[in-house]
Image (cartoon, grey):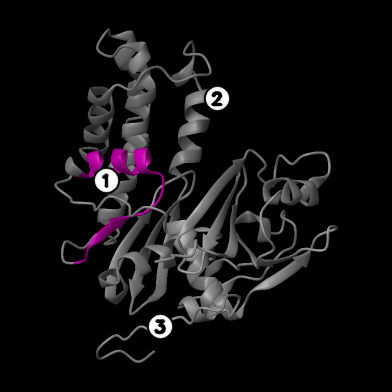
Amino acid sequence: MNISAPRAELIGLDWGTTSLRAYLLDEQGGILETRARDWGIRRLPPGGFDEALDDVLAGWPECPLLASGMVGSRDGWREVPYVDLPAGLDAVARALDFVDSAGGRRLQLIPGLRHGPSADVMRGEETEIFGALALQPALAVRSALLLPGTHSKWVSVRHGRVVDFTTSMTGELYAAVRHHTILGAGLGAEDPPIDHEAFLRGVTAARDSGAAGALSRLFSARALVLAGRLAQQAVPDYLSGLLIGEELRAALAAGRIDHATPLQLIGNAPLCHRYAAAASCFELGMALPPPCAAALGLWQIARSAGLTAAALPQPRFHGAKL
């Protein structure tokens, strides 16, 4: 029996601030090949966006192109307006915009999401969210999602739509404190080997900081070293624990963590494992991230927008008006 090889149906791009990742996807949304480049929107080759696109697509077949992330931001290739909440897959797919490259390729761009009342925004995370919901449909009915990173996103989903989110600048704060304050003095540019004990010590300090918060404990990273109670090489992990612990403490205080609502991690696996370890100090459970959420999210949005031949099944939520 002859079994035909999978046929390429879509090229999806996850194009952020610091990196570009490309997925060649088949007619079922499976990944045929992945490529990565260090060409985010802030660091492009001499030929700019056009050269970066031509390079990452070299040798791949002609397919519809769809990109998520900061490439569609004000500082990207073309700004695509945000979609206001509440927003589901259909609303995002309807709001696609495009840019034509110098080489004649049309690149469809995915809009980000905007939470009007708090003036909060996201770009790129929405694609991972829809991919995760497709991988785990039970999350679509009611769930809390956490996408940790430079700017962590805490997201509420109801009946397949993002209804609320907030941003914590935990990763960027860590980089600033670690590399540009006295707390990181003498450590050098590279982080030392991971010190899990120091990390959990920092999480616990944030957890027990009460109403004062972890900002009242930050200088302890310096004081503990001076007192001989914390090794200098353990400072990065202690700081990481403090800041992640503060993010969790604040989320609990704000009511964003509900023990009756599943809390799902999405994103970089090592970082998600770190958050799950921190959550254990608060007696919280966090489900580890599903694989390939970004690629599947690109596929889901492409199908909803009619960029591929495959039809997108319509989800059903009992008792919900969509």
Closer to us: 212 or 114: 114
Q: Residue at x 83, y 39 (%)?
A: 46
Q: Position of residue 115 (x, y in %)?
A: 50, 70
Stretch in magenta = 261-279
Q: Secondary structure at mark 3?
A: loop
Disc 3: which residue:
313
Helix, strand, or loop for circle 2?
Answer: helix
Residue 113 lies left or right of residue 95; in this view the side is left
133 in relation to 196, above or below: below
Give the vertical position of 102 relative to 205 (above or below): below
Q: Quadrant of the C terminus?
A: bottom left
User: Between marks 1 and 2, how big is the CA–CA gap?
Assistant: 26 Å
The residue carrying pointer 1 sits among few (fewer than 14), some (14 to 19) or many (20 or more) residues within 10 Å by Cα, namely few
**Mark 3–mark 1 distance (CA, rounded to whole Å):** 47 Å
Q: Is residue 121 visible?
A: no
Circle on res. 273: none
- Residue at x 54%, y 48% (from the top left corner): 34
Distance in Å between CA atoms under marks 2 and 3: 50 Å
Q: Which residue is mark 2?
A: 180
Q: Amino acid at mark 2?
A: His
* Residue placed under numbered mark 1 in the picture: 211
